[in-house]
Each structure stands twice: as C-alpha cells, then as structure tokens.
Image: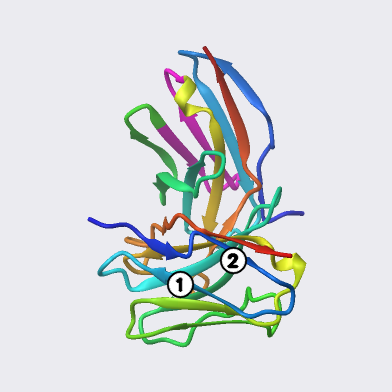
Amino acid sequence: GAGVSQSPSNKVTEKGKDVELRCDPISGHTALYWYRQSLGQGLEFLIYFQGNSAPDKSGLPSDRFSAERTGGSVSTLTIQRTQQEDSAVYLCASSLSTGLAGNEQFFGPGTRLTVL
Amino acid sequence: QKEVEQNSGPLSVPEGAIASLNCTYSDRGSQSFFWYRQYSGKSPELIMFIYSNGDKEDGRFTAQLNKASQYVSLLIRDSQPSDSATYLCAVNGAAGRRALTFGSGTRLQVQP
C-alpha cells in the first residue's frame, strides 16, 4: 500500500515568513511523528500524535513551532516567523500503534526547508 | 553522555564480508530498538527491529540486543556495495515516551 507522503518536497522561504508542511500517514496508522534532520546533525524529535490523546510536544524547539492533526489522519506542521536555523529536512513518520507491538515507525520522504 | 551512541565511521568492509555496527544507549527503561538505513539525500528506511534479548535474523541482517549491557548491534552478512549507507540506531523509551531517540549514525562503505 501507499507509504507516508509529505508535501511540499522542497520549500524555500524568506526569513520571517510562515510555512506549513503537510504529512499524510499510512492508512490505518494511529500514531504520527514529526522529526527534523539538520545538515550534519542527527534526527531530532519534534512532536507526536497518538489517536485522540493530547500530543506530546516536548520536542518543539520554540513556540514558533506548532502542529495539528485533523480527523486522526493528515497533520500540518507550522513554523511561524522562520529563522535561518530552521533550515532542515522535516520528516514525518507513522506507526500502527504505540504499544510494544506495532510501534515500528515508517518515514515519509521529507520536506527540505531552506530559509534565506 | 548522549542517549544513543554510535561510532560515526566510516566503517569500510570488502564486498562479501560481514559488517558489524554497534550502538549503546543510556535509558535502562528502553523497550524497543530499531535499525534504519539512510542513503544520502533520502529518508530513513526501517530494516530491523528487536524487543527481546538475543538475536533476530532477517535475511542477511541480524540484530542483537543485550539489555544488561545496554547494547544493540546489527550484523550484515555478505555485504554488497548497495549496502553502503548511513545506519541509524534508534531507541524507543519507556511507556509514555514513544518518540524515537536516534544515534548520529555509522557510515558504512562496502568496497567492491
């Protein structure tokens, strides 16, 4: 079946602008995660959603970052007033559940964000 | 101390050899462990996961877990040039924290 999809694949924006990144998880997956990977850096957790529970926002680097998940499916990550240090690849992943069985996470292709 | 540690490499092995990739983690409450392969410019691809102490084999890949030593490894048998990539170790924490913590990755080069 279809994997995780993300759009856009590339986004170039000017410092101070807002951007929205979209993620479509694998159908039937209840958990959705956002990570980012900066050049030469490891993968950094941002936020995750599990079903109807309150999201775990513990990885968001500042209050300029927010995310929502509508209808338990599609998610949007919003970065307000972008800064150059926000430049990174933003990766979305989904898993069937968050229990011990079924919590394998599958990644989308990512959105490469460049802030000029 | 980083939560998940890997040698950055590069680890260079000849074609057909066994590649051994290692990872240590600090959270004793960690319950599940993953190996991802990441080609340059691509997103991580899940290749193995393991929950219980011991070995788990899937084709040319074997994951090994030792919770007492907080150590997880990945063996790649009959290494191929197409296995050349960065291998990321990821750990899923105790209940309540299901986000993955990643190591910085080990770059593997398989020489033809």
The chain containing the residue under callout 2 comes to A
Report if residue A98 lies within the magenta region.
Answer: no
Report if residue B75 lies within the magenta region.
Answer: yes
The crowding category of the residue bearing disc 2, from other C-alpha atoms within 10 Å (few below 14, some 14 to 19, many at least 20), is many
Image quadrant of residue B54? top left
Tell me which numbered mark, 1 or 2, is placed earlier along the sequence: 1
On the picture, is B76 further left or further right than A73? right
Q: Are marks 1 and 2 in contact (CB under 8 Å)?
A: no
Q: Secondary structure at mark 2?
A: strand
Mark number, residue A22: 1
On the picture, is B93 further left or further right than B54? right
On the picture, is B91 further left or further right than A61? left
Compute the Cα span from label 1 to label 2.
16 Å
Mark number, residue A45: 2
Count how many numbered circles sit on residues in the image: 2
Residue A19 percent across, percent down from the top left: 59, 76
The span picked out in magenta is B62-80
Q: Is residue B112 above or below residue A39?
A: above
Q: What amino acid type should be assigned to the residue bearing mark 1?
A: Arg
Q: Is residue A83 above or below residue B107?
A: below
View extreme (left): residue: A1
